[in-house]
């Protein structure tokens, strides 16, 4: 049985031209673990700030943050609950 955690991922994109499309691509690949998303384009500073609420295994969340963190001009931080949740089934 897989245990999941709930958490938040903060993303700051400094290089919109180079990385914004790639960030959206990876978020689309991991849409199954994304509960909610809020993105704010901070035009005055020419950056974008995105917060993602996720529910997934530590492997899934780590894979997403790892891919995002390797992109040029992208900074990623995550915070996860310490409590683990069992995967939801119709029996829960």
Image (cartoon, grey):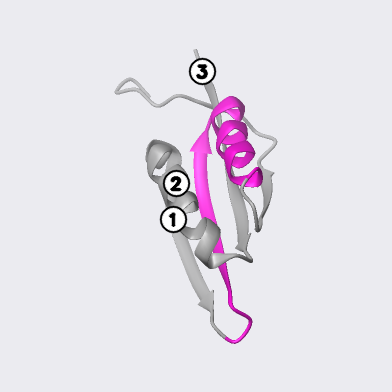
Q: Is residue 46 left or right of residue 31?
A: right
Where does the image place residue 22, in percent across and percent down from the top left? 47, 50
Residue at which label 1 appears? 21
Residues shaded magenta: 44-70
Q: Mark 1: which secondary structure?
A: helix
Check contact, mark 1 vs mark 2: CB within 8 A.
no
Closer-to-camera residue (7/50): 50
Check residue 56 in the rendering and tell me which mark sits there, or answer none: none
Residue found farthest to the front? 18
Q: Earlier in the sequence, mark 2 or mark 3?
A: 3
CA gap between label 1 and label 3 equals 31 Å
Check residue 2 in the rendering and tell me which mark sits there, or answer none: 3
- Image quadrant where residue 85 sits: top right
Closer-to-camera residue (69/4): 69
Crowd tier of the residue under label 3, counting other residues whose Cα lies within 10 Å: few below 14, some 14–19, many 20 or above = few
Where does the image place residue 79, in percent across and percent down from the top left? 68, 47
Quadrant showing the C terminus? top left
Figure check: 4 above or below 75: above
Task: Please tell me which residue is depicted at 51% across the width and 44% down the height of the picture.
Answer: 54
Count all numbered tags in the image, as a single digit.
3
Q: Mark 2: which secondary structure?
A: helix
Where does the image place residue 46, in percent across and percent down from the top left? 59, 78
Task: Please tell me which residue is depicted at 65% across the width and 45% down the height of the picture.
Answer: 69
CA gap between label 2 and label 3 equals 22 Å
7 in magenta: no
Crowd tier of the residue under label 1, counting other residues whose Cα lies within 10 Å: few below 14, some 14–19, many 20 or above = few
59 in magenta: yes
| Mark 1 vs mark 3: in front | 1
Crowd tier of the residue under label 2, counting other residues whose Cα lies within 10 Å: few below 14, some 14–19, many 20 or above = some
Residue at which label 2 appears? 27
Q: Earlier in the sequence, mark 1 or mark 2?
A: 1
């Amino acid at each position: 049985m897989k245990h999941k955690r709930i958490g938040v991922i903060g993303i700051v994109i400094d290089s919109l031209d180079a990385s914004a499309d790639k960030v959206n691509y990876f978020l689309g690949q991991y849409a199954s673990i994304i509960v909610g998303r809020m993105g704010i384009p901070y035009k005055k500073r020419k950056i974008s700030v995105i917060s993602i609420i996720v529910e997934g295994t530590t492997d899934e969340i780590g894979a997403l943050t790892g891919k995002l963190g390797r992109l040029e001009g992208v900074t990623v931080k995550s915070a996860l609950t310490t409590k683990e949740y069992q995967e939801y089934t119709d029996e829960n």
